[in-house]
């Protein structure tokens, strides 16, 4: 049979040719190296597709869904009953939907939330808080830094406090792929802030994304969570100074000290909006207001939730210390979501073509290129 055409073979040959023949011309050598890397990427993608077709339960009926999930997450801690224990503790102490919301916030699993409340979260534009994403981790870590500083930590120590909590959280929920991805992106952003090199955070983010794609190239095509996390954190890096400086010029936001958190929420939403419209076909018109009311409390709910669960499993009588404020915050979450979801104009249905995605990000790129040279960036 004739040999099947493989594009990566052509790239390997051309890359080696340019690198060896034009050895004294650095620009051409670099171009040859780029062709080699691109060829490796195509080869890795082809192998990943083969692995996906073999390991997918749909193509391999003998493999159960449970085994597939186990292979993907590599989770042993939660399989030993830890997750069921937590679920039982939450169900005993919190009613629905508060208990379901807490479980989703902590573990990023939305199966527990009913269809009605999923729709309400969509209409209110806060569905993202029930998923473990890069933007959520960045926002939560920023709140943790502010909390640590308020408790008397120096800013350098507050960085380690936030970093420890991020990876402790990833450990507790069992190192799922989405949490690892979000933890890497959030940690890189924090690290760039610590060393005062926020302008190089984009390079660190691209390096992290490249490393993750080297392990699984299919993330770029099939994992909407990867795409949204990457864009959200990229938006926080590039667009956040514009919103933050604009908000600090408003006395209300400057007085309450929430300009940074609100700016993060706005930038994440703006940068992910075209992709959300293309994939889901709707936009929440009330998401700005609901996120401003909910996101600043997100880290407090997560910390209180963990402390509640730890005390409930170690010494039940003490858990009410954390259960009381946790219940108040979860009731507040439910009220905000319910209030905004009931508005008849909460959602605008708008299905866009894929052509709008490059156009939208081109407009954003032009705005950033021109806007960075003028106030309120400066």
Image (spheres, grey):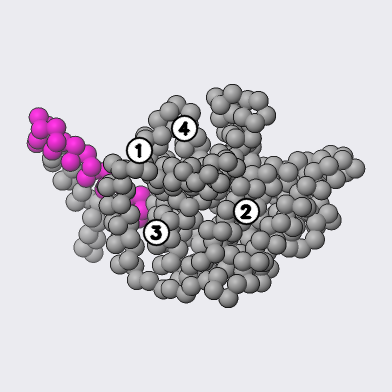
- State the residue in front, 45 or 361: 361
The image quarter containing residue 51 is bottom left
* The magenta stretch spans residue 192: no
Q: Position of residue 216 (x, y in %)?
A: 43, 50
First reached walking from the N terminus: tag 4 or tag 1:
4
Please say if 348 is above or below 128.
below
Disc 4/disc 2 C-alpha distance (Å): 24 Å
- State the residue in front, 227 or 141: 141
Kind of element beneath mark 2: helix
What's drawn in magenta, residue-wise?
21-46
First reached walking from the N terminus: tag 3 or tag 2:
3
Q: Which residue is mark 1?
A: 378
First reached walking from the N terminus: tag 3 or tag 1:
3
* Placement of the N terminus among the 4 image quadrants: bottom left
Q: Position of residue 213 (x, y in %)?
A: 40, 47
Disc 3/disc 2 C-alpha distance (Å): 31 Å
- Viewer-nearest of labels 4 and 2? 2
- Whether label 3 touches label 2, CB < 8 Å: no
* Placement of the C terminus among the 4 image quadrants: top left
Q: Which residue is mark 2?
A: 294
Position of 221 with respect to 60 (left or right) is: left
Q: Which residue is mark 4?
A: 193
First reached walking from the N terminus: tag 3 or tag 4:
4
Q: Position of residue 359 (x, y in %)?
A: 29, 62
Q: Which residue is mark 3?
A: 221
Residue at 76% of width from left, 63% of height from top?
A: 96
- Viewer-nearest of labels 3 and 4? 4
């Amino acid at each position: 049979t004739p040999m099947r055409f493989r594009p990566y073979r052509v790239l390997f040959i051309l890359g080696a040719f340019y690198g060896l023949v034009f050895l004294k011309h650095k620009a051409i050598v670099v171009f040859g190296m780029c062709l080699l890397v691109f060829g490796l990427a195509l080869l890795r993608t082809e192998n990943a597709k083969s692995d996906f077709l073999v390991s997918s339960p749909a193509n391999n009926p003998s493999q159960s869904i449970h085994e597939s999930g186990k292979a993907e997450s590599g989770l042993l801690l939660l399989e030993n009953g830890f997750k069921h224990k937590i679920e039982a503790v939450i169900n005993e102490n919190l009613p629905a939907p508060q208990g379901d919301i807490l479980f989703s916030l902590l573990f990023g699993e939305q199966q527990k939330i009913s269809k009605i409340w999923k729709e309400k979260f969509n209409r209110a534009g806060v569905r993202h808080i029930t998923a473990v994403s890069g933007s959520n981790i960045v926002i939560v870590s920023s709140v943790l830094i502010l909390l640590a500083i308020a408790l008397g930590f120096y800013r350098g120590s507050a960085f380690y406090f936030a970093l420890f909590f991020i990876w402790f959280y990833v450990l507790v929920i069992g190192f799922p792929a989405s949490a690892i991805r979000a933890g890497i992106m959030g940690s890189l952003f924090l690290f760039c802030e610590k060393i005062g090199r926020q302008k190089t955070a984009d390079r660190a983010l691209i390096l992290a994304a490249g490393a993750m794609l080297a392990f699984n190239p299919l993330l770029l095509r099939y994992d909407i969570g990867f795409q949204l996390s990457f864009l959200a954190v990229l938006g926080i890096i590039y667009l956040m100074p514009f919103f933050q400086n604009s908000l600090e010029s408003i006395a209300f936001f400057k007085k309450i000290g929430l300009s940074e958190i609100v700016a993060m929420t706005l930038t994440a939403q703006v940068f992910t909006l075209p992709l959300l419209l293309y994939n889901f076909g709707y936009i929440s018109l009330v998401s700005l207001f609901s996120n401003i009311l909910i996101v600043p409390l997100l880290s407090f709910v997560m910390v209180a939730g963990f402390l509640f669960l730890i005390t409930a499993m170690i010494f039940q009588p003490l858990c009410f210390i954390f259960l009381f404020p946790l219940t108040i915050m979860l009731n507040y979450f439910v009220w905000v979501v319910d209030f905004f979801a009931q508005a008849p104009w909460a959602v605008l249905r708008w299905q866009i073509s894929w052509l709008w995605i490059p156009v939208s990000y081109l407009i954003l790129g032009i705005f950033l290129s021109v806007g960075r040279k003028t106030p309120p960036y400066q």
